[in-house]
């Protein structure tokens, strides 16, 4: 991460814009490395590819790990290697963070999923835990009062929602699930556009706020 550079004007920005994510200057947790080493899973020779480097931090903003997303050499897609993403370091409970959370936090699995929600709700502090299992185990800030669960579709998303909702309730935190129409929120952003995603998420948040303010039935 320290050897990388800000992503504005790099292939990382090209890649993110291709995924509908435009506010690249606002992401200090992300940097770009033009020649990041990767060893393929099949024990092939070590290669170098451009990569997005993400800082994984704990609740005190101390870096505990890094996540690498290798990119095609023109930034048009992920690199044609398996897998195109890997994390290293102390990851469990920690996350890639966008904005400083106090009483409200949105948490999801993937970086692009979380950034898609931030694209249309830029004031919402968010964290990417990097996998379903790590999202289920994410640590809560001590001041947190409401957790928005940015779940993915599928069985792993079901498990994460259940575990996080139970953990939040035990900690006295209100958990609210936000679910994509497609596989994840980046799919929604790319297929439906920012305006449609923003309108739907804002409508869900307004409805959720109205439900919270309604008097309880006897």
Image: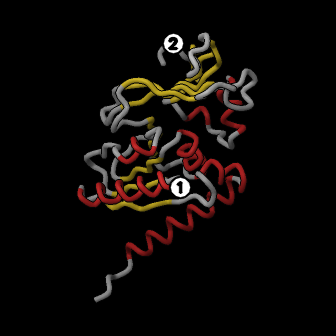
Q: Quadrant of residue 43?
A: top right
Mark 2 or mark 1, earlier in chain: 2
Q: Where is residue 28 in the image (x, y as percent from the top left)?
A: 50, 29
Mark 2 vs mark 1: in front: 1
Q: Give the distance between the C-alpha atoms of the residues marked 2 and 1, in whole angstroms.
A: 37 Å
Q: Which mark is residue 3?
A: 2
What secondary structure is marked by label 1? loop
Q: Is residue 199 left or right of residue 135?
A: right
* Position above or below: 166 against 102: below
Pick whichever, 28 or 173, lies toward us.
Answer: 173
So how many labels did they put on this image?
2
Residue drawn at x 69%, y 26% is: 80
In which image quadrant can residue 47 be found? top right
* Structural crowding at the residue carrying mark 2, measured as other residues with C-alpha within 10 Å and reported as few (<14), some (14–19) or many (≥20): few
Q: Name the residue under label 1.
A: 154
In percent of the image, x 45 and y 61: which residue is there?
177
Residue 5: x percent and y percent? 57, 18
Horizontal and vertical percent for residue 167? 29, 55
How packed mark 1 is, by other alpha carbons closer than 10 Å (few <14, some 14-19, many 20 or more), is few
Q: CB of mark 2 within 8 Å of CB of mark 1? A: no
> Residue 67: image x %, image y %?
49, 27
């Amino acid at each position: 991460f320290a050897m990388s550079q800000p992503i504005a004007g790099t292939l990382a920005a090209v890649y993110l814009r291709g995924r509908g994510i435009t506010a690249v200057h606002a992401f200090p947790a992300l940097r770009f490395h033009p020649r990041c080493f990767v060893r393929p899973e099949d024990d092939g020779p070590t290669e170098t590819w451009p990569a997005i480097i993400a800082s994984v931090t704990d609740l005190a903003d101390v870096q505990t790990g890094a996540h690498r997303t290798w990119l095609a050499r023109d930034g048009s897609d992920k690199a044609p290697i398996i897998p195109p993403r890997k994390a290293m370091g102390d990851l469990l409970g920690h996350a890639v963070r966008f904005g400083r959370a106090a009483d409200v936090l949105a948490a999801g699995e993937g970086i692009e999923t979380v950034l898609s929600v931030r694209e249309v709700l830029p004031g919402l502090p968010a964290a990417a835990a990097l996998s379903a299992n790590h999202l289920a185990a994410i640590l809560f800030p001590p001041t947190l009062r409401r957790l928005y669960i940015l779940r993915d579709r599928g069985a792993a998303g079901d498990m994460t929602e259940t575990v996080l909702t139970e953990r939040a309730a035990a900690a006295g935190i209100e958990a609210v699930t936000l679910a994509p129409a497609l596989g994840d929120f980046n799919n929604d952003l790319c297929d439906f556009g920012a305006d449609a995603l923003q309108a739907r998420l804002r409508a869900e948040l307004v409805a959720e706020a109205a439900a919270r303010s309604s008097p309880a039935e006897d």
